Image (cartoon, rainbow, N blue to C red):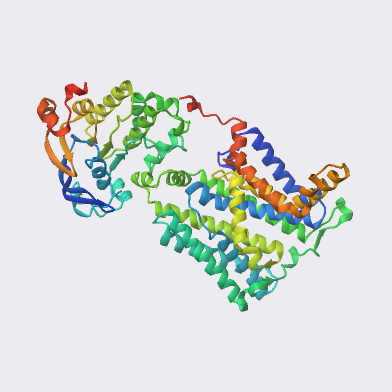
Amino acid sequence: MMILSGDPPRSRALTLVLVVIILALAATPFLFPGAKALNVAAKICVFAALVASYDLLLGYTGSVSFAHTMFYGIGSYAVAIALYGMGPNWAAVATGIVVGLPLAALLALAIGLFSLRVAAIFFAMITLAVASAFQVLASQLSWLTGGEDGRSFQLPELLRPGTVLVSKSLFGFEINGRTLTYYLVFAVSALMILGLLRVVNSPFGRVLQAIRENRFRAEALGFRTVFHLTYANCLAALVAASAGMLNALWLRYAGPDTSLSFSIMLDILLMVVIGGMGTIYGAIIGATIFILAQNYLQSLMGVASKAAAEAGLPLLPGLLHPDRWLLWLGLLFIASVYFFPTGVVGRLRNVGGDKSPGASH
Amino acid sequence: MTDLLKLSGVHTHIGRYHILQGIDLAVPQGQTTMLLGRNGAGKTTTLRTIMGLWQASSGEISLAGQRIESRATPDIARLGVGYVPESMAVFSDLTVKENLVLAARDGPLDDTQLEWIFGFFPALRRFWLSRAGSLSGGQKQMLSIARAIIEPRKLLLIDEPTKGLAPAIVMALIECLKEIKRKGATILLVEQNFFAARELGDHVLVMDNGTIVHRGEMAALASDVPLQERLLGLSLEAHQ
């Protein structure tokens, strides 16, 4: 339990779901051939870490931030600009990290100190304004960021798809630079999620939960809540920026659509809510459900529509037509929020036990 | 007998309402001072103003000689002021243990103090790892008080601890507060339950319309029925 910081999933069903997801992600390069499966798996890894960092804010402190994609974007652009400007080498990756992470932390610090001492709505509005300004800035500074086109770049030799590390003749499958990049994304995302689990289960995490429940009460116990909230904001920003770096390394590209757009922010919010706020594990489940639905619902509906047509069923072929996938995606989310108000994790924990001994009193 | 807490000419505005209108009071060291008054008299606002949760518009508040009216709430708490808000204020999502660890703030729980608390509130030991939100009302109030006394405090501000509790729990709470008192704690206690006030108070302050309208010995007020009726609109006999 050390690795989970004494906070196990606390439900057999939840443990099973998490184990299946993690094993599937770990074995994706060998189990699911093709670029799409690997892209989807990498996106799940990156977003699981990104959503977990947002959960630290929303789920553990109750702060609604709209600037999370900005930190994600800072990480993406830092690595992209460094690799674009300095060429495909490890020094450029290191420069991106050394510049991107402190920049994200400093901005989070400034936003936190400026807005976290007042009402939560003010913090939300400030983050929205700063994120919008940053998005405009990124597209205006085209000499640096590539503007609307973004920046494409090459990776260091070791991470390139053409670099064969283990040839196919040896084990029956090839391990190349792309596989290595995938495992880099997988491992760093996993470490970040475990790190966040450690944070939320530390005394600091308990103070955050106390602040979420009643800020004044926490202050009356002697906790300087602005300090705690700002520190949480900086930690979340650091993880978001790191996730952005991983995303840029995976895509070999950073642009407004992939790292700064407001739709990413909405996706993160949905993933947190679907998975279950204030659980960290919910981030893994929310990201998996959302990204799988985003990528496979349309083709699944195509199969279902075709089968319904062949069976001669009325209405269904039209309703399940692949062009209507967004409608069904929306309905799926409404249903998940309706049936799992505490998220999938909350639901699975209720099914699998987690009965408090004091519940009967 | 020195005064640990002193308020002089304290005014507090909440929005456009002028709640405290020049409060002068003193809480002697090692004594229990009762703050009584009708609903809306300003008792809770007085405690919240001392705690810095509402900023005093004017006046002076000093704790052991140090001015605190401009200090932030966490700083006041760190000076040794424990605050028990009304309405069973626990952190529901945290366990009983986590609530107490949080209150201990900078260090581990003192085992001796913990055993002493368990002696009064055995339910807290029984539900040690349960979520505080799943406790009964009385158990929550016990936890709320335990949180304030888990560490040595110079001053305890307690707001209506017996509100909404069953008589048996009220008696247990009174016994606990008496024991805390015997250990030499300085307490400013807001209470609507006159029986509890009589049992616990050394001194009494009665508030009305944001001002102190009576100050004296608790025993004197408890034995003066006409004065009780004039100040509080009720008498101890009527309350029993």
Task: Determine the residue positioned at 60% across, 54% down.
Answer: A268
A128 vs A18, left or right, is: left
Residue A247, located in which quarter of the rendered image? Answer: bottom right
- Residue at x 70% of width, y 61% of height: A250
Q: Is residue B111 visible?
A: no
Q: Does residue B89 sit above or below A121 in this rendering?
A: above
| The C terminus of chain B sits in image quarter | top left
Pinpoint residue B219: horizontal percent, then vertical percent: 12, 27
- Rendering coords of residue B109 (x, y %): 39, 36
> In this image, A88 relative to B117: left or right?
right
Picture residue at 41% right of the left edge, 37% below the top:
B99
Q: Is residue A240 left or right of residue A89?
A: left
Residue B30 visible, this angle = yes
Q: Work out whether A234 lies above or below B100.
A: below
Nearer to the camera, A145 or A333: A333
Instruction: Name the quadrant containing residue A87.
Output: bottom right
Above or below residue B88? Residue A329 is below
> Is A156 on the left or on the right of B36, as rendered?
right
Task: Give the x, y percent position of residue A356.
Answer: 51, 29
Horizontal and vertical percent position of residue A56? 53, 50
Q: Nearer the viewer, residue B213 or A240?
A: B213
Task: Give the total of numbered labels.
Answer: 0
Q: Residue at x 65, y 55 (%)?
A: A46
